[in-house]
Amino acid sequence: MELLGKRSGTAGSVTTAVIVVAAGNGTRLGLGPKAFVTVAGRSLLELTLERVNRVRGDVEVVVVAPASHLGEAQRLASGARVVPGGATRQQSVAAGLRALGPDVQRVLVHDAARALTPTALFDAVADAVAVSNAGVIPALAVADTIKRIDADGTVLGTVDRSELAAVQTPQGFPRDQLDLAYSAVEADHTDDAAVFAASGRTVIVIPGDPLAFKVTTPDDLARAEQQLARSEPHVPAVRTGIGIDVHAFGGDAELRLAGLSWPGEQGLAGHSDGDAVAHAICDALLSAAGLGDIGSRFGTDDPRYAGAAGEVFLTGTVALLAEAGFAPSNVSVQLVAQRPRFSARRIEAEAALSALVGAPVSIAATTSDGLGFTGRSEGVAAIATALIRTI
């Protein structure tokens, strides 16, 4: 989608500019350059620019993007100037500053990863800069108790949280002072307020907004989609996911499958109990919510899950969905196996799994007509499809 608007990347009488920092690689999110990761079909950069384009008055917009995505950034940021970023955030902001027109007097620097930041917060920061002639940062009070710890994890003391604040963007500055601060900076800093303060200049705080949270992890991405579903009617309130799991028969343990014990049947090999049906359901639910997969959430290197029953993973997965604002609506599973004979206990298995998931679970079982590893009775395969909803 191309964003058309009044914003201009050219010089002239425009006195306020917004530098949108979109050059981060998104390592923790693991989906490529973060600003181009999509939420409900739109990239974080696109969502950010929608809000920037509603800032009051005439505003010059400069987008700092990865060199690999300059073309895509220009398509999304029609009417704005797009420049390549540097190796660090600080270098990227400096590149954005160099691209500004000579008449700009106030600069707001904003992270594209804070894609749901309300336009009103941009206006509030710009107004505060104009009044104070100082650096201005939005921030939220810290609600959690904060502890100081040493390298071994020993608590050294409790920090007075009344002196702490969780800083957000956009951060605003008088343009001439920010240019001087960046020209004098030697060390690398994590935000522009730190660069500004390191040069001996004043930074003040105004109230932030909970919607200005930063998308850093898959949980943050799910939170953003949940918020969009609530606030924008065109964002679907339901999502689907698919999960597949395969386990070989092996070992002396009794078979656990579809949440049931199967006396007289050889167990499935695996770090846990090998319940392929339960594991496929977990992957389908996590996939639908954008929360990764069972391996990333319940790793095989975690001794707590050695030999764990499928219900442990199912209840843990449902809890993760609830934290992200989702709940299961229903799950359908296809089991492919020569054994055990499943049909006699299908209703029992569906009831057990439905109780764990908190939504209807249906299971169909089939064989592969003697073909492949399932046909040779070497193991089982399960494919699950899940439907979840926002709560």
Image (cartoon, rainbow, N blue to C red):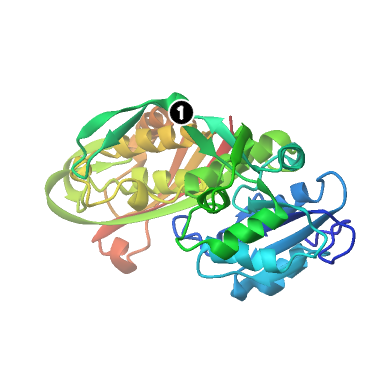
Q: Position of residue 151 (x, y in %)?
A: 21, 45
| Image side of residue 338 versus residue 365, left or right | left
Q: Is residue 368 visible?
A: yes
| Image side of residue 23 versus residue 334, left or right | right
In this view, 283 is above or below 155: below
Q: Quadrant of residue 150?
A: top left
Question: Which residue is nearer to you in this view: 340 or 58?
Answer: 58
Q: Position of residue 198 (x, y in %)?
A: 50, 51
Question: Which residue is nearer to you in this view: 243 or 112?
Answer: 112
| Image side of residue 291 versus residue 274, left or right | right
Question: Which residue is nearer to you in this view: 78 or 30?
Answer: 78
Around disc 1, counting alpha carbons within 10 Å, would you say few (fewer than 14), some (14 to 19), or many (20 or more)? few
In this view, 136 is above or below 348: below
Residue at image point 82% right, 46% down: 54
Q: Quadrant of residue 128?
A: top right
Residue at image point 60% right, 75% down: 68
Residue at image point 22% right, 42% down: 305
Location of the C terminus (image quadrant) = top right
Q: Secondary structure at mark 1?
A: helix
Q: Is residue 23 visible?
A: no
Q: Position of residue 185 (x, y in %)?
A: 52, 61
Q: Amino acid at mark 1?
A: Glu
Q: Position of residue 41 (x, y in %)?
A: 68, 54
Q: Which residue in the structure is indicated by mark 1?
A: 163
